[in-house]
Amino acid sequence: KLDPRRCARKHDSYIQSRADTMQNIESTIVELGSIFQQLAHMVKEQEETIQR
């Protein structure tokens, strides 16, 4: 027989796991955005150097 409390705990654990994963994905995307901004800045600096 299924224990509703056990099912609820499993469901809560699953939801928390998904939330943690989404948070991880979000922080990775933010970090990736920062890397691309740094790259764009480096490219712009090199472009200015080449034009001289």
Image: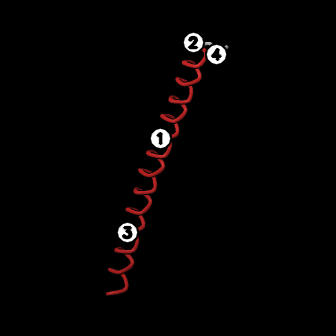
| Residue position for label 3 | 40
> Does the residue at mark 1 contact the one at mark 3 (Cβ under 8 Å)?
no
Which of the two marks, 4 or 2, is nearer to us in this view? 4
For marks 4 and 3, the one nearer the N-term is 4
| Residue position for label 2 | 5
Q: Secondary structure at mark 3?
A: helix
Q: Residue at x 58, y 19 (%)?
A: 7
Quarter of the image that includes the C terminus: bottom left
| Residue position for label 1 | 22
Which of the two marks, 4 or 1, is nearer to us in this view? 4
Query: 12 or 41, which is in the foreground?
Result: 12
Q: Residue at x 51, y 28 (%)?
A: 16
Quarter of the image that includes the N terminus: top right
Among the 4 quarters of the image, the one containing residue 33: bottom left
For marks 1 and 2, the one nearer the N-term is 2
> Does the residue at mark 4 contact the one at mark 1 (Cβ under 8 Å)?
no
Q: How is the image coloured?
A: secondary structure
Q: CA distance from mark 4 to mark 2?
A: 9 Å
Q: Is residue 20 toward the left or the right of residue 46 in the image?
A: right
Q: CA distance from mark 4 to mark 1?
A: 29 Å
Q: Position of residue 32 (x, y in %)?
A: 45, 56
For marks 1 and 3, the one nearer the N-term is 1
Residue type beneath disc 1 = Met
Query: 25 or 34, which is in the foreground?
Result: 25
| Residue position for label 4 | 2
Which of the two marks, 1 or 2, is nearer to us in this view? 2
Q: CA distance from mark 1 to mark 2?
A: 25 Å
26 vs 43: above or below: above
Residue type beneath disc 2 = Arg
16 vs 41: above or below: above
